Image (tube, grey):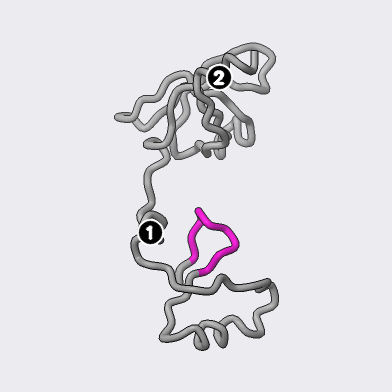
């Protein structure tokens, strides 16, 4: 059985046949349906390896801070230091721009905004 954070609401079951998988999910309260067919290892391989969040971050992206005194606030990334695993942010909800440096462990990617998309918004 495989449950991943990247696909909420989905559970992968390895079984000898489809009837075994159906029997496994029968009687479970919140199961709405099942997706018929087989899934190859190559299709779920990307969900098995947990990539560090720092690899996904880039300048201009919108993130949410998940820990520390600024927990729950959203910010725009102005600089990324992959060696130190830190990002410098500008809080979006602050009345004035105050750059803060936060460990990447306390960041959650919300939106990937490129330079062109940013110019269109202004």
* Residue position marked by numbered label 2 in the rendering: 90
Q: Position of residue 2 (x, y in %)?
A: 45, 68
29 in relation to 76, above or below: below
- Residue at the image point whose x is 40% and y is 24% from the top: 80
SS at badge 1: helix
Q: Position of residue 37 (x, y in %)?
A: 49, 73
- Residue at the image point whose x is 43% and y is 82% from the top: 15
Residue range highlighted in magenta: 3-11
Q: Residue 105, labelled with which disc?
A: none
SS at badge 2: strand
Q: Is residue 15 left or right of residue 121?
A: left
- Residue at the image point whose x is 45% and y is 22% from the top: 59
Farthest residue to the front: give it: 37
Residue situated in front as seen by the camera: 67 or 111: 111
96 in relation to 61, above or below: above
- Residue at the image point whose x is 30% and y is 29% from the top: 83
Residue situated in front as seen by the camera: 63 or 31: 31
Q: Are marks 2 and 1 in contact (CB under 8 Å)?
A: no
Assign the C terminus to one quadrant of the image: top right
- Hey, which quadrant is residue 10 in on the image? bottom right
- Hey, which quadrant is residue 104 in on the image? top left
Q: Estimate the spatial distance between the alpha carbons at disc 2 and disc 1, rounded to whole Å.
A: 33 Å
Q: Nearer the viewer, mark 2 or mark 1?
A: 1
Q: Position of residue 101 (x, y in %)?
A: 46, 23
Magenta: predominant secondary structure element? loop
| Mark found first going from the N terminus, 2 or 1 | 1
* Residue position marked by numbered label 1 in the rendering: 48
| Residue 6 is inside the magenta segment | yes
Q: Position of residue 74 (x, y in %)?
A: 61, 29
């Amino acid at each position: 059985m495989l449950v991943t954070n990247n696909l909420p609401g989905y559970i992968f079951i390895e079984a000898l046949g489809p009837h075994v998988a159906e029997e496994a999910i029968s009687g479970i309260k919140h199961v709405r349906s099942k997706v018929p067919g087989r899934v190859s290892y190559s299709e779920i391989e990307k969900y098995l390896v947990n990539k560090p969040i720092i690899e996904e971050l880039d300048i201009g992206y919108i993130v949410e801070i998940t820990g520390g005194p600024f927990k729950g606030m959203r910010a725009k990334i102005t600089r990324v230091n992959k060696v130190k695993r830190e990002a410098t942010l500008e809080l979006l909800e602050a009345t004035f721009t105050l750059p803060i440096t936060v460990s990447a462990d306390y960041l959650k990617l919300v939106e990937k905004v490129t330079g062109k998309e940013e110019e269109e918004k202004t």
